[in-house]
Amino acid sequence: MDYTATNQDPLSVADTARKLNRSTEQVRRYLREGRLQGRRVGGQWFIEAAAVEAFGATQSSEGAFLKSLRTAQRTKPLDAVIGIGAGPGSDIVHGIASYRADSVRGK
């Protein structure tokens, strides 16, 4: 009888790594951490195709979320910070506009 692989056959770590575009060590780490469901037979991991598809879907949604975040360079997170102590002496209650004006005047 000739054996042919079907979609029901579990995938090896190497096959899973190729499907997820990850290294084999990353796939093993996902398995150890429980992020990717698989079973260990002897010393080798086997992963169901459905588990790989589910894991890939969560990874792509996380990737889409991360891509939607603006970079720090675009958001300029320090623009809203008011210098205290080493600044030119503006009062914090007057806000950043006062601080910047005092900085320009060299106060």
Image (spheres, rainbow, N blue to C red):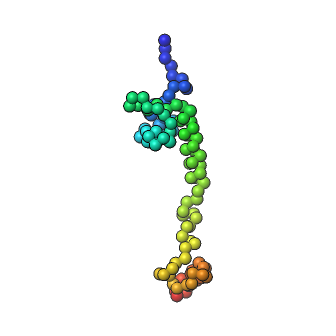
Where residue 106 sits in the image (x, y, percent)?
A: 52, 86
How many discs appear? 0
Tell me if residue 80 comes above or below residue 39 in the rendering.
below
Q: Is residue 43 visible?
A: yes
* Residue at the outermost left position: 43
Residue appearing at x 41%, y 31% in the figure: 44
Q: Quadrant of residue 23?
A: top left
Give the answer, above or below, for where 98 lies relative to 51: below
Q: Image height check: is 102 above or below 34?
A: below
Taking depth in this image into account, of 93 and 78 the one nearest to the observer is 93
* Residue drawn at x 52%, y 85% as measured from the top left: 89
Which residue does the image show at 54% across and 70% down from the upper left?
78
Left or right of 33, for residue 72: right
Along the line of sight, the residue nearer the viewer: 60 or 33: 33
Q: Residue 103: x and y, percent?
A: 54, 83
Residue at the top extreme?
A: 1
Q: Position of residue 53 (x, y in %)?
A: 56, 36
The picture quadrant where one finds residue 12 is top left
Give how far across and how far down residue 62 sits, in percent: 57, 48
Q: Does residue 5 appear left or right of residue 41 in this picture? A: right
Q: Is residue 15 something that shows in the picture?
A: no
Depth order, front residue of 105/89: 89
